[in-house]
Amino acid sequence: MPRKVKFTKEMILEATIEMVRETGIESINARDLGGRLGCSSRPLFTAFKNMEELIETARKEVSDQFLKEVLSSDSTWEEEIKNEHIHGTSSTKEFGIKIAQYAKREPNLYNFIHWKGGMMPDIITLNEVMCNRYSVEFDLTPEEAKILFNQMSIFSLGLCSMITHNVMYFSDEEITDLLKRQFISNLSYIKRTEK
């Protein structure tokens, strides 16, 4: 008698994430996901209570991968930051450009974690990390750093929304310029008004 194939949570999550990557969250259902795995939908519900739990677990996994990528540092970034002549762009580059690049490369996954229900899981972590960076790099109070983070988040999310929904196309150079200008403008305003 042939041995039954066992579908692990990891296998099911991987298949779910791949389906979201290819077609978006709107197309995910138990029957098609089971078909992708070569089984009925039953194994899905031995690993997860229901589709909501599966989707939320997948969303958390994608969010964790997104954070890891966005918060990673490369030596090329560090070298560019050291050579940067315009004050006020190092954090925004590392933060904003990596987010925009992810949105361009993975529009369905970006939309999955940022526009499909509830609190964006990565925002809390990004808030903490970026507010600390802003405080140290630009001599801001915690309150000022939070205002700067919120303003840049609103701008970045809007920019990425236009990218992922094909409203406008921006080259990497245009994205860099837009983020730099917005950052300098917000930082200047905070420094001017908080004194």
Image (spheres, rainbow, N blue to C red):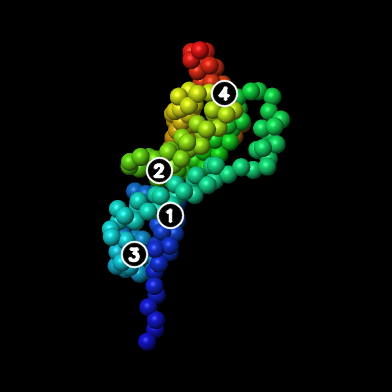
- How far is disc 1 from disc 3 in space, using C-alphas? 16 Å
Res 47 label? 3
| Residue 93: image location, x then y, percent | 59, 32
Q: Amino acid at mark 4?
A: Asp
Identify the residue under disc 4.
139
Mark toward the viewer: 1 or 3: 3
The Cα–Cα distance between marks 4 and 3, rounded to whole angstroms, is 49 Å
Image x and y of residue 65, in percent: 49, 49
Label 4 with label 1: CB-CB less than 8 Å: no
Disc 1/disc 2 C-alpha distance (Å): 16 Å
Residue 132 versus residue 70: which sits nearer the camera? 132
- Which mark is nearer the camera, 4 or 2? 4
Tell me the residue at 42%/38% (across/down). Answer: 124
Q: Secondary structure at mark 4?
A: loop
Which amino acid type is shown beneath numbered disc 2? Pro
Q: Which mark is residue 141?
A: none
Of 184 and 106, the residue lying toward us: 184
User: Of callouts 4 and 3, which one flags the residue occurring earlier in the amino acid sequence?
Assistant: 3
What is the total number of numbered labels drawn onto the structure image? 4
Q: Which residue is mark 2?
A: 121
Disc number for residue 17: 1
Q: For residue 8, which quarter of the picture?
A: bottom left
In percent of width and height, residue 22 lies at 44, 52
Badge 4 or badge 1: first in the primary sequence: 1
Q: How packed is label 1: few (under 14 Cα within 10 Å), some, or many (20 or more)?
A: many
Q: Earlier in the sequence, mark 1 or mark 2?
A: 1
First in sequence, mark 1 or 3: give its number.
1
